[in-house]
Amino acid sequence: MQKDTTNPLTQEGFLRLPEVLAVFPVCRSSWYAGVKKGIYPAGVKLGKRTTAWRVSDLRKLLEGK
């Protein structure tokens, strides 16, 4: 059985912003505005200049939970 490598939400872990925006059809500024308003989940700081989003949080958003 092969793993689905085309859909980043089939895996566990974290996604960086370009990968997130490939799944959610919004621009970068709209994503960050949505995070600020609580529409989208907040990212996790992995370093000084590195933020990523939990795949589990993004799945919940897609499922409407």
Image: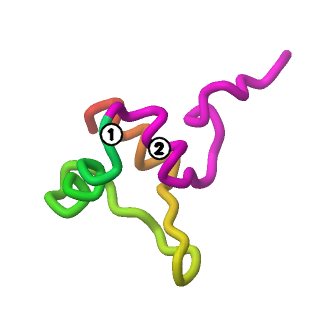
Question: Left or right: where does residue 38 sit relative to residue 4?
Answer: left
Magenta span includes 52: no
* Residue depicted at x 34% and y 30%: 63
Question: On the image, which quarter does residue 25 sit in?
Answer: top left
- Up the image or down, 14 lies above or below 49; here it is above
Q: Magenta part of the protein: which range?
A: 1-25
Q: Which numbered disc, 2 or 1, marks the residue closer to the eye?
A: 2
Q: From the viewer's side, name the closer residue of 12 and 24.
A: 24
The residue indicated by pointer 1 is: 61
- Seen in the picture, residue 65 relative to 13 is either above or below; the reply is above
Type of residue at label 2?
A: Val
Which quadrant does the C terminus fall into?
A: top left
Position above or below: 44 against 14: below
Q: Residue furthest top?
A: 1
Q: At numbered mark 2, what does the secondary structure look like: helix, strand or loop?
A: helix
What residue is shown with label 2?
A: 20
Percent of width and height locating residue 56: 48, 46
Closer-to-camera residue (53/16):
16
* Label 2 to label 1: alpha-carbon separation: 12 Å
Q: Secondary structure at mark 1?
A: helix
Q: Residue at x 43, y 40 (%)?
A: 21
Q: Is residue 13 left or right of residue 33?
A: right
At a point 51% along the width and 46% down the height, the residue shown is 18
Return the mark for residue 45. Answer: none
Quadrant housing residue 1: top right
Closest to the observer, 7 or 64: 7
Residue ID at (32%, 55%): 41
* Residue 38 image-quadrant placement: bottom left
- Across and down, in percent, residue 32 comes to 28, 58
The residue lying furthest to the right in this view is 1
Left/right placement of residue 23 relative to residue 15 reads left
**CA neighbours of label 1 inside 10 A, class few (<14), some (14 to 19), many (20+):** few
